[in-house]
Amino acid sequence: MSTQVVQASESNEASPRHLAPAGAEGRSSDLPAAEDRGSLTVADRVVKRVAGYAVTLVPDATAAPRRVLGVNLGDSRPEDAAHVDARVQGDTATIEATIAVRWPESVRQVAGQVRETIRDQVQTITGVRVDHVDIDVVSMNVPEKKTRRVQ
């Protein structure tokens, strides 16, 4: 029986580039410039979902009640995300939200909190800057406690 001895080379030249430890060679000059690598497009529906969720983070604002022909049907829906429309152009969004505000809170103050929360959450989560937020307050009938879904 014969035994083979394999020696490993200590130079980085023999190891594949993708296995080299991070920072071993610094930044790779083989990569194209950052602006030439591609782009990220955030869909309108992603911004809608994030903005709708952001409304639930404001204590005195909730999703508005369902509406048919301009008439509210039922109560506001604190457990649901608000109805939001969003249009994204490039890295900027315009948002329209329909909400309910808890009585007797100031509509102006709550709407300001909603605007700020939507801007912060959309920017943080998606990287899209919010240019304009329209708030439509359609109800001030908000239940005190969230209703249980399963009873």
Image (spheres, rainbow, N blue to C red):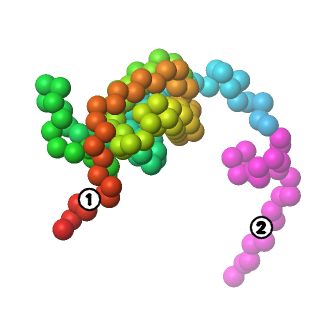
Between 47 and 135, the residue placed more toward the observer is: 135
Q: Main secondary structure of the magenta part?
A: loop
**What kind of element bears circle 1?**
loop
For disc 2, the marked residue is: 6
Q: Residues within 10 Å of mark 1 (few under 14, many from 20)?
A: few
Residue type at mark 1: give it. Answer: Thr
Tell whether label 1 touches label 2 (CB within 8 Å).
Answer: no
Instruction: Give me the residue at 73% from left, 30% from top.
Output: 30
Judge whether residue 82 can be spotted in this image. Answer: no
**What kind of element bears circle 2?**
loop
Instruction: Give me the residue at 46% from left, 45% from top.
Output: 58
Residue 149 spot, x, y in % from top left: 23, 60
Judge whether residue 41 can be spotted in this image. Answer: yes
Residue 25 spot, x, y in % from top left: 83, 43
In the rendered view, would you say 4 is above or below 127? Answer: below
Q: Quadrant of the N terminus?
A: bottom right
Does 127 sit left or right of 32 as displayed? left
For disc 1, the marked residue is: 147
